[in-house]
Image (cartoon, rainbow, N blue to C red):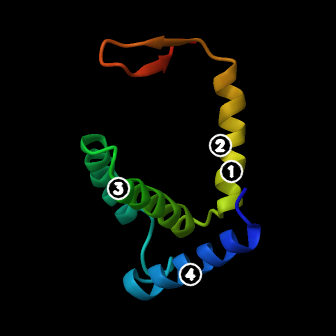
């Protein structure tokens, strides 16, 4: 398990870096980081063994959420809620290997 203090320090460092490098949430919204995330996801799909591509996607998701006013705790709460919804769904695999819910 990750030490909560290390998580808090990481988030503080990341937010400070992002504000200095790209502007504060008041100066720049979440759309730019989300569009960048789209690009990075394509790169990750092409190279899933590259741990830096995983990091890029994670950092961009955190940045976009922060710029929209969501904390890491919010993201975990959203994910918990969605997991409970997904547990109740029926899933089917498409020809391309992607699973989608059918109910």
Q: Earlier in the sequence, mark 1 or mark 4?
A: 4
Q: Give the Cα distance between marks 3 and 1.
A: 21 Å
Label placed on residue 32: none
Query: Please, what secondary structure does the residue beneath circle 3 have?
Result: helix
Q: Quadrant of residue 99?
A: top left
Residue at the disc numbered 2: 79
* Foreground disc of the pair 3, 2: 3
Q: Quadrant of residue 91?
A: top right
Q: Give the Cα distance between marks 2 and 1.
A: 5 Å
- Towards the viewer: 62 or 45: 45
Q: Residue placed at 61% from the left, 79% from the top? A: 12
Residue at the disc numbered 3: 53
Q: Give the Cα distance between marks 4 and 2.
A: 23 Å
Q: Would residue 32 be found to the left or right of residue 102 on screen?
A: left
Residue at the disc numbered 4: 13
Q: Give the Cα distance between marks 3 and 4.
A: 20 Å
Residue 53: percent from left, percent from top: 35, 55
Residue 26's place in the image compared with 53, above or below, is below
* Foreground disc of the pair 1, 4: 4
Q: Quadrant of the N terminus?
A: bottom right
């Amino acid at each position: 398990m990750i030490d909560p203090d290390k998580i808090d320090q990481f988030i503080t460092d990341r937010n400070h870096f992002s504000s200095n490098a790209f502007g504060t949430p008041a100066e720049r919204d979440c759309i730019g980081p989300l569009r960048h995330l789209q690009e990075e996801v394509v790169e990750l799909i092409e190279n899933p063994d590259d741990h830096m591509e995983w990091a890029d996607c994670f950092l961009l998701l955190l940045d976009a959420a922060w710029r929209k006013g969501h904390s890491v705790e919010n993201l975990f709460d959203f994910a918990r809620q969605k997991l409970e919804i997904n547990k109740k769904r029926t899933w089917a695999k498409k020809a391309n290997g992607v699973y989608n819910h059918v109910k």
